Image: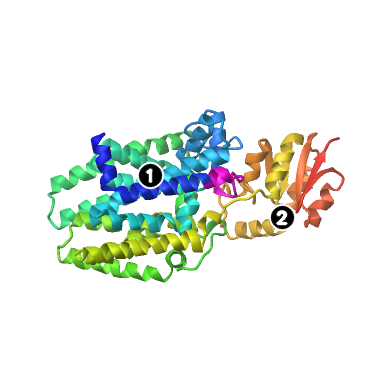
Amino acid sequence: MKKIKGTFANHYPLVIYLLIFAVVFSLKLIQNPFPFFDWDESIYAEVGREMIDSKSFFIPLWQGQQWLDKPPLVPLFYGIVMFLTPFVQPEISTRLATLYLSVIGLILLYALYFKVIKETWLTTLVVVITSLTSIFLQRAQVLNVDIFLLVGWLGYILFYRKFWVSLLFLSFSVYSKSLIGFYPLGMMFLYFGFEFITKKISFSQFLKETGRMFIQSSILLIWHAVMFFLFGPAFLYQHFYESHVKRVTASIESHFGQRTFYIDLLYLQYGKYIAAAILGFFLLFYQWMRKQISDKKILYSLVLFPWFIFLNLTKTKIFWYGHPYLGQFAFLMVYPITLLKKFRLFYYGVILIVMSLVIQHYFFNTQVLNDFYSSDDPHHRLAKYANSYCKNLYVVIEPEGRTASQTLNELGLLISTSRWWGNHPSMVYYFEGDLHFVYTIQELKNEMRSPEKDTCVAVNQNDPEALTIVKSLDQLQSFDPWALYLYSF
């Protein structure tokens, strides 16, 4: 107990900030339980629910089909949260769980950079800046895999010397993002390789460290081996080629962007102040070359930087891929302030001024508490309504969506599960029945030749081709721009 009290006392700026952060955003989530939004959030909610209902704890399921793209941890976690809290609306309980995981991620981020800065106020400033970026806030308030990845990466680096603890953290990242989860293990391998090349450790020590990492990776790859045994080449193709190789080499599923996408993303998050990160980077490099800081501190300081470099080489551009490197650049931006440590009063004054300006900007100027990532939309209401009247539901993709899907297919930019989700995968969660997304008019014609009784069709009212086919059905209800039809014969 004394140790815990001592930790709180020594790091009270961080404790106070994270307590306020958690309370403020918890209240926001509780007061605004909007439906799960498209895409990933509703997918993880539905997959998690199905995994618990079917007791499929190691294989993700989507409408009863094995989802081989992703490992099971994230949807299983959300499924467990929903199962353990039946008295709380899932849109609240799962998002609160994500928020608290994000707080843990910020604590680990603080612990990492405290090892370099060795001062609580400046390290807390890194956390404040990171936590209020639009990407971090969005990921902290919606169901996602990225916070699991960040917690796993940071925890592994911080607790590397504790075999089982670091393995636990590594399992967080690997079983949320698969091979990408091994990133911190790769960084430690490069670190010890450098230490060996520069003769700071012996060859036997290098072998000992690599052997340790080999054992850890072998343990975590057991799930992949079992999945290959169960599903064979289909698992290799969907899990490794489509979800890893293809995302690097192609802009799959219309995730296009300029070559500088992730650099531009930094500017969107930090504005012109990101230029300070360049100064921070060269200051670190200069201090390291002058042996003012150790190799280990350089590792802690720049461990997330190669992820940023890697993303700039990939073809698929998605904003939340930048989530792990936000803290890296927040640290580099404020690191030059360490030069003021000799002038203690000035040093703390600068930190407090910057911290105050950051908080004022986000809470008063941009009003982050008014940013919501979902809303109660027509397709949500349609799915809930159809749940009471329809045995099956066919949702016809809008004309623009059908054209886009056909174009992407011709370009080879779709993967095996691309057409599972439709334009609104949240409809599957709220319908709670057998739902099919229809991507072509011919497919709709085929389904309407002999539909089962109480089959429903949802059609966009600006889709004359589809409306012609369903005009003989009874129109149940309109949810502009959607119309719901029922086959009741």
The color scheme shown is rainbow
Q: Is residue 286 visible?
A: yes
Q: Position of residue 22 (x, y in %)?
A: 44, 46
Up the image or down, 11 lies above or below 125; here it is: above
> Which numbered circle lies on residue 413?
none
Image-quadrant location for residue 220: top left
Disc 2 secondary structure class: loop
Left or right, 400 with reference to 198: right
- Quarter occupied by the C terminus: top right
Q: Residue at x 39, y 69 (%)?
A: 273
- Using the image as rendered, state which of residue 254 and residue 385 is in the foreground: 385
Q: Is residue 29 magenta?
A: yes
Going by the numbered disc 2, the residue's amino acid type is: Glu
Disc 1 secondary structure class: helix
- Using the image as rendered, state which of residue 344 and residue 410 is in the foreground: 344
Q: Which residues are magenta?
A: 28-41
Q: Position of residue 411 (x, y in %)?
A: 58, 60
Q: Is residue 17 magenta?
A: no
Marks 1 and 2, Cα distance to the nearest angstrom? 41 Å
Up the image or down, 28 lies above or below 340; here it is: above
Q: Residue at x 61, y 37 (%)?
A: 63
Q: Residues within 10 Å of mark 1 (few under 14, many from 20)?
A: some
Up the image or down, 360 lies above or below 177; here it is: below
According to the image, label 2 marks what residue?
398
- Using the image as rendered, state which of residue 46 and residue 434 is in the foreground: 46
According to the image, label 1 marks what residue?
104
